[in-house]
Image (cartoon, rainbow, N blue to C red):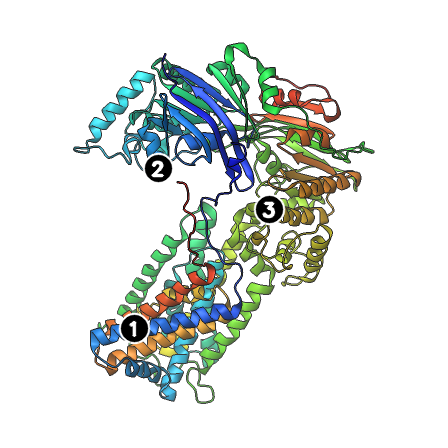
Amino acid sequence: MNEKEKKTREPLFHIAKRPAIEWWKAWLIRGGAIIASLIVCAFIIVILTKQNPLEVYAAMVKGSFGTPRKFWAMLQNLAILLCISLAVTPAFKMKFWNLGAEGQVLFGGLCSMVLMFTVGDKIPNWMLIASMLAASVLGGILWGLFPAVLKAKWGTNESLFTLMMNYIAIQLVAFAIMVWVPSGSSVMGLVNSTTKAGWLPDLFGQKYLINILIVAVLTVVMFIYLKYSKHGYEISVVGESENTARYIGINVKKVIVRTMILSGALCGLAGFLLVSGTNHTISKELAGGNGFTAIMVSWLAKFNPLIMVLTSFLIAFLQKGAGEIATNFKLNTSIADILTGIIIFFIIGCEFFINYQIKSTKSKEGK
Amino acid sequence: MGAPAIELKNICKTFGSITANKNVSLTVNNGEILSLLGENGSGKTTLMNMISGIYFPDAGHIFIDGKEVVIRSPKDAFDHKIGMIHQHFKLVDIFSAAENIVLGLKEKGKFDIKDIEKKVADISAKYGFDIDPSKKIYEMSVSEKQTVEIIKVLYRGANILILDEPTAVLTPQETEKLFAVLKKMKEDGKAIVIITHKLHEVLAISDKVSVLRKGEYIGTVMTSETDESQLTEMMVGKKISLNINREEPEGAQDRLEVKGIDYESIDGVKILDDVSFTARSGEILGIAGISGSGQKELLESIAGLRKLDGGEIIYHNPKTGTSDNLRDRTPTQIKELGVRLSFVPEDRLGMGLVGNMDIIDNMMLRSYKKGKTAFVERKQPRDLAEKIISDLEVVTPSANTPVRRLSGGNIQKVLVGREIAAAPTVLMVAYPVRGLDINSSYLIYKLLNEQKANGVSVIFVGEDLDVLVELCDRIVVLSSGRVTGIVDARNTTKEEIGLLMTGTKGGSSDE
C-alpha cells in the first residue's frame, strides 16, 4: 500500500501554457491568422455575393491607397483613431475601463466649436486656434475627470459612468446644433468656410499633415511616458495590483485621477483635431465610433503605443476598404462589416495560440 | 448500533511530490460528533474533500453504512447523503435563503417558493435555527450565511455533515448557538465531522477526536478520556531538531513598541484585541498562532496599510534617538520619518511583487521615486537585480524575466533580497519559508540571522513550531487576535506554545 500511492498522477488542472515564444513564431502565427481569415472571407464573399473574392480584395486595397486623396484620407483616419487609442491606453493599462472616449472626444470637439462659431472672426487666428486647443483639452479633461473622481472617492463603477457620459455629450452637441442652425436642420454646414478662421492650416499643401504630425509626436511621447517615466511605472503597478501599489506607498486615488486627466485631455485633443483640422463642423457622429474602436486598437497592441501604429493602420484600412467595396460592388454595407468582423476575430483569436499550446491529454484524470 | 455511518480505510492522496494524506483511517457513527484536529496544512480539508467528491483518493476505501462506495463527484456525495459546509460559502448573493437552498435541485413538479420556504422553516424549527427564508444573502451576517449552508445540506437529506472550520468566522455567542444546533442534529442521529484546530471547542462539542499531523493519521481518542495536553502533543508531535544557527542577541535595544492595538474588520469582528509587545534590535521576535489569528493584520498595521481602532505603534529611531508614533501613517509617511521598515508579506505575488513585471522592475518598487527627474532610473535596480540573482542563487533565465515565471523559492529570494537590500532597521517577514524547499528555507534563515547580527529587529511570523522554537529569541503567541503569551524561545516547548495558540491558557507568561 505504501509503495502504491507513490505512482505519480497528473495534477487536476493541466493548462498547457507556452513558455515564452520566439517573436518570429508569434508573427508567423499572426500572419497565418490573417491569411486564414482572408480564405474564410473569400468563401463568404462567394456564397453571399457571387463576386470574385480576389477582385473584392483588390478593390479594398485600391479603396485605401488607390489615389493620393484616398491615401491621405486614410492616413487622417488612422491619425485620429491612433490619437484616441493613445488616449485610452494609460487608463486601460491602469485597469480603469474608460468607455467614454467617444463622449470625451465629442465634448472636446464641442468646446472648440463653441469658440470657432462665436468668436471666430473677432480675434486673431492664431489666438483662436490656441484657445480652441485649450478649450478642447479642458473639455476632455472635465468629461474624463468626473467618473475618475467618483471612482477614487466612492468606488463607483467607471465603465457605467464613462459610458453614460457619452450620451450626455451627444445630446449637448444635438442641442448646440439646434441653437446654431437657424433653419432647424440637424446638419451643420462648414463653419467659417470663407474666412477659414479656426481651421488648422495646410502644410506643404496637405490638408491633414498637421493632424498626422501631431499624432506621430504624441505616439513617441506616450511610448516614453509609459515605459520610462515614474508616472508610467505607477500606472503599471496600480493596474497590475492595487495591493502592491498600496504596499509600496503609491497613492492609488491620486494615480487614478491623474491618469484620467491625461486620458481625457488626449481625447479632447482628438476632438480639436477633428473640428479644427478635419471637419470644420460638428455633428453627433464626430467621433464616429472611434472612441470604442480605439479600445480594440489599444488591446490588440497590448498597450504598446508603437505597435498601436500597426493595429490602428489595420483597422483604419479595413474600415476604409470595406466601405469601398460596399459601394464599388453595390453590396449592402453589412457585408463590409461582416468581413471586418471576421478578420478581427481571427487576429484576436490567434493570440490564444501564441499563449497556449494544444496538447493531447494522454492520461485521463481519475475524476 | 449497526454499521458506522462512514468509515475510511487507508486513504492516501498526493499532489505532485507533496503527500497530503497518508494511510488515514477513521470512523464516524450515527449520532456522533467527530473532531478532526490538526495544524494548518495537516491534510484535514483534503481528507474531507475526498469524502465530498471534490478530490478522488489515490488509494484506500470509503464505506458508507458498511458498504464500500466510490465517490467521484459532489453529486455522488449527495447521493450518499453526505453534505459538506465549506469554509468559504458558496452562495448567490442576490438570491434569498430559500432560493439558494434549492439551487441546483431537480425536483419534479411546480417551483413553489412558498412551499420551499415552509419546508425550510420546518427544518429550522426542528433543529433550532434562526433564519428568515426570504431574506437575501447579501443582507445576511456571516453566521446567517453559514446557517443557510447547513440548511442547504439538510434540505437535501444529508445524513453525514462535514463542517470545515465552522467557528473560524463566528463570534463566541454565534459559536454557542451553532454548537446547540449541532447537538440537536446529533440527537437526531446524524453523523457529524467538524474540522478545527481550537482545542476547547473540540472538548466542548465532540465525542471523539481524530488527529492528523503533516498528512499522517496519528490516532483517535474519546473526548471524555483525553485532555488538552495530550491532544496538543498529538497535534504538534515530538520535537525535531533542525540545527538552525542561533546566536545570543547583542546589545538589544527596544526598537518597535506595539501598545494595546485594536483592529476590527468591517463586519465588526475583532481581529486584533489589545495586542502589545516590544521588538528589540538584534533579535528575532517570532509570532506564532493558528493562521487567521490576526498575524496578517498586525504586520499590515505596522506597515501603515490598515487604520487601527486603538493603540499606538512607537518606533525608537536609533539614529536620531527620537520616538515616533507610526499609527495612522501611510507607508510613504513612515518612510519620510526615516523609519527603515522592510516587510515581506505573506502574499508574495499579490502584494510584495508584481508578477507580470521583470526582476528589475520589481527591484524598483521600493526605490522608483529616487532622483529628481520625471523618469525612472533602471541602472541601479539592474545592478541590484544582478547582485541578488548571483548572491542568493536565484534560478532565472535573466533579470528581464517576469517574476511570475520563477519558482516559489526563487520568487521569495527576489522579494527577501529586495527588502534586505533596503538596509532596514525593522524587518517583518510573514511565512517566509512557506512552500520552499529545504535549501531555500535554510538560506532564508541564514539571511534573517545575518540581519539579526547587523542589529536589525526581525519580526518573524511563522507556522512551523519547530522553526519558531529554534530560530527565534522570543515568541509572541497570538490566539484569536489576542496575545496569550510571550515566551523565551530558548526555554519553551512546542507543547507550551501549542497550548497558548489554541487559546486555553490565558494571560501573559514570563518576560
Q: Chain of mark 3?
A: B
Identity, as a three-letter code, of the amino acid under mark 2? Asp
> In 3D space, how far apart are the residues under numbered discs 2 and 3 (Cα atoms)?
35 Å
Q: Secondary structure at mark 1?
A: helix
Q: Is residue A116 visible?
A: no
Give a yes or no on whether discs 1 and 2 share a subunit: no
Give a yes or no on whether discs 2 and 3 share a subunit: yes
Residue B34 percent location from the top left of the image:
45, 19
Q: Which residue is label 2 attached to?
A: B93
Question: How packed is label 3: few (under 14 Cα within 10 Å), some, or many (20 or more)?
Answer: some
Residue B373 percent location from the top left of the image:
66, 63
Question: How packed is label 2: few (under 14 Cα within 10 Å), some, or many (20 or more)?
Answer: some
Looking at the image, the residue that sits furthest to the right is B251
Of the two numbered discs 1 and 2 in the rendering, the one whose residue sits closer to the viewer: 1
Q: Secondary structure at mark 2?
A: loop
Q: Which residue is label 3 attached to?
A: B408
Which residue does the image show at 48% across and 43% down from the upper left?
A9
Q: Which residue is label 1 attached to?
A: A41
A19 with respect to A324 (left or right): right
Q: Chain of mark 2?
A: B
Identity, as a three-letter code, of the amino acid under mark 3? Gly
Q: Is residue A85 above or below residue B20?
A: below
